[in-house]
Image (cartoon, coloured by chain):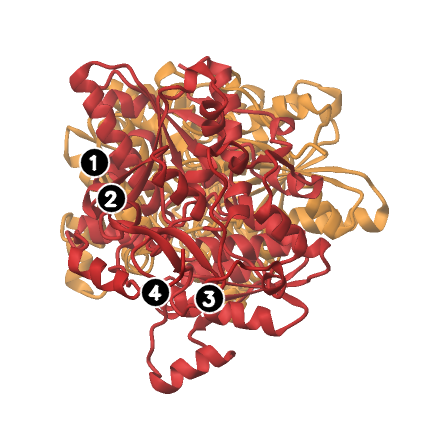
Chain colours: A orange, B red
Amino acid sequence: MQTKILLDENEIPTHWYNVVADMPNPPVPPLGADGKPLGPEKMLAIFPGNILEQEMSAERWIPIPDPVREIYRLWRPSPLVRAHRLEQVLGTPAKIYFKYEGVSPAGSHKPNSAVPQAYFNKVAGINRLTTETGAGQWGSSLALAGQMFGMQVRVYMVRVSYEQKPFRRSMMQTWGAEVFASPSDLTHAGRGILERDPDNQGSLGIAISEAVEEAASRADTNYALGSVLNHVLLHQTVIGQEAKKQFAKVGDYPDMIFAPCGGGCNFAGVSFPFFADKATGDKRAQNLRFVAVEPASCPTLTKGVYAYDFGDASGYTPLMKMYTLGHDFMPPGIHAGGLRYHGDAPLVSQLYHERLIEAWAVPQIATFEAGVLFARAEGIIPAPESNHAIRACIDEALRCKETGEPKVLFFNLSGHGHFDMASYDKYFAGGLEDYEHPDEAIHAALERLPKVAA
Amino acid sequence: MQTKILLDENEIPTHWYNVVADMPNPPVPPLGADGKPLGPEKMLAIFPGNILEQEMSAERWIPIPDPVREIYRLWRPSPLVRAHRLEQVLGTPAKIYFKYEGVSPAGSHKPNSAVPQAYFNKVAGINRLTTETGAGQWGSSLALAGQMFGMQVRVYMVRVSYEQKPFRRSMMQTWGAEVFASPSDLTHAGRGILERDPDNQGSLGIAISEAVEEAASRADTNYALGSVLNHVLLHQTVIGQEAKKQFAKVGDYPDMIFAPCGGGCNFAGVSFPFFADKATGDKRAQNLRFVAVEPASCPTLTKGVYAYDFGDASGYTPLMKMYTLGHDFMPPGIHAGGLRYHGDAPLVSQLYHERLIEAWAVPQIATFEAGVLFARAEGIIPAPESNHAIRACIDEALRCKETGEPKVLFFNLSGHGHFDMASYDKYFAGGLEDYEHPDEAIHAALERLPKVAA
């Protein structure tokens, strides 16, 4: 029985797919902190013009430069895998497929955008990038990408992660990046926080402030973000495009697509190319359902509001219309660090608002239970983020068992868990908790939303 | 430029290749501790008959059962990769290829033998296996393999590793294995040592004694070994067989093959199928060189003697004719745990003794330097064991740069370093040491070799 559906390197997509071209309504634009439409000049301090063009483009297809495709060849196309053994364990009539993005050197889908972001900065004459990282997936991907184009990369890593996850830090250093614990004494933002609180453990919001401040204040340095923005979602569409070719090879087509959803780039990457089928009237796609899976403890889509909010905790970024729990929301310390963001990508938020996609929230312990079940059936030990999609997919497969429906279920296995074994340890020791996000906390955070006209 | 040379699943080899059929002399047999030829009855207490048949077979081709090939499909065939970027960084006219075995769920080549060992025990009616593990590569591979066939696996993990490498332990537990720190209070051997020394940190020799003792004393339980024995080397030949098909696809053929060499299964796996070409008069192979790369701190082939010795520290195993530094040799604490074995596989030893293969010894710090250079060029962060092959290959590529020779160099990238980042940390911090094995220590250890007739 065929297990892996592979593609040749010459089948790596030649273009990224821009979902904006197929959305029923144009994307809601970002605003300045004053509530007025945002001009590109402010963004040019930290992003190159070629990336800002992608950010605002409505073109359906955007070419992937050859030097980016050359780097993609190091691990792409990634395999599509039929999970025969998982189906058997569950006793489901459903067919289960997953796309495995853990084959990248950094171990997740994140290099799909890190590589082009490094490249576009390089051709714009920039040789130095800053970024932030929490759990370390994005920071290590940008470190890898920077090294591929001979660029310097500085990563501000949330202090608590810097201390608890030294191996993600070593990984970034192996690829030549500088890594500093944030808050640091390298920026005004960092020094200010350390003066008030020398033991501050850091947050993604603070780390973003430090990385943005440095990029904005140095002409030779730009900033790179690992999710949320349109161009990041765009770059990830190589995942779904490859998957479509792979499904075609075995004459199958998904009925439901599941992906973990934090900032949204993972979900967008696997879903949007199939969304194009649905939008353009492809018959097979007419009943296709897209499920963004988020943690019950950080239920942005399922419990947040659709409003203009800042992308970071400190309010340095433009205002974006998105599902949000409030920009100063502090999610509990769940182990899927990539899913602890207070908001969702504007494009994903808009599609959800227009009821074109669904969102499910799943509790932490059940995600690890699903991850272990998966690892024992298929071998691969998934990242905690990926376990969210696996949980949702298994739940649906079990429903199919009850109803007898032979649905085709497809999820994105966005990364491996080799750097997350401490969380598996905690799961086995019974030390994980489930957090239900209290409604009062949401109300309180939403009252602090920025007041803008829109 | 093509980077990865892939095969379809139906190109997974159907047979293992047995080098015994092509060796100029029959293999030197193992002896009992009394120096007399060893009957199979003693081995049957811990190994099933079907595996002992493979151990003693002289057949050239041994069929791979379908259930084993089904599990191989989860990650095999592994890619052959042309290291264009490394060639460019080195400025060498040589072509560099590597086979990447880190794609297995356990992250190394070890499951190639763990899966058939679990399977052959299963069909022999055994549902429970014991083994030992040091750094954890073999233990995690057997945990994975046992889970695939619904078998219980108990791993005795050297105590110092159990404490220092908790994530390899979590990995084994994720795949359902029991893991105990060795010495443990579960065996006579373990209890005896703990009585004398309650703080004993363990050794591979002690862990082997515990695993063998338990397997020998329980009818429902067998023992599995991760290297050295003929059948383990046999199973690994899927690597070299696939590589030959992959080289044929691009019309190339190696001039030199490099592999890290500890117990020898990694080296054997990639080399032996090419050795078959040479032995059977294939013209392309007539100048082909095979290089077993070992640590300068544990220079079994380059500084050991060819003699009968025990496979374990305590002298529980049969005597095998092999290159050895003495069975009670304690190698220094280098970070390539898989290469710290006092001896070498009898088949590898015999080929070396007959000057059909070469051995190079490389110092620790230079191997990490090579690994980092490789990671920065090709993305993948290699295991410390694999860095030995990379070092040797880079040295040869640099020689080619001097001479202008466009040699085809090929090495086995036996695993990734995701669970070895602490050693990279130490390298970056300047905390690694080079150890030259002192001749006096060798003389002393060799004086304690068992006295046998042969």
Disc 3, disc 1: CB below 8 Å?
no
What residue would you read off at disc 1?
A215
**Disc 1: host chain:** A
Camera-near label (1 vs 4) is: 4
Q: Which mark is residue B164?
A: 4
State the quadrant of the C terminus of chain A: top left
Kindly indicate whether the residues beneath marks 1 and 4 are on one polypeptide chain.
no
Q: Amino acid at mark 1?
A: Ala
- Disc 2/disc 3 C-alpha distance (Å): 50 Å
Q: From the viewer's perspective, is A67 left or right of A374?
A: left
Q: Nearer the viewer, mark 3 or mark 4?
A: 3
Q: Earlier in the sequence, mark 1 or mark 2?
A: 2
Q: Position of residue B69 (x, y in %)?
A: 65, 38
Q: CA distance from mark 3 to mark 4?
A: 35 Å
B134 w.r.t. A47: above or below:
below
Mark 2 belongs to which subunit? A
Q: Position of residue A91 (x, y in %)?
A: 78, 50
Whether residue A124 is situated above or below residue B125 in the rendered picture:
above
Q: In the image, are marks 3 and 4 on the same chain?
A: yes
Front-most of residues A347 and B397: B397
> Image point 42% across, 30% down: which residue?
A112
Cα distance, mark 1 to mark 4? 39 Å
User: Which residue is disc 2 drawn over?
Assistant: A173
Instruction: Give the labeled residue for mark 3.
Output: B33
A2 vs B284, nearest the viewer: B284
Q: Nearer the viewer, mark 2 or mark 3?
A: 3
Circles 2 and 3 on the same subunit = no
Is residue A320 depicted above or below A337 in this figure? above
| Amino acid type, residue under disc 3 in the picture | Ala
Labels 1 and 2 within one chain: yes
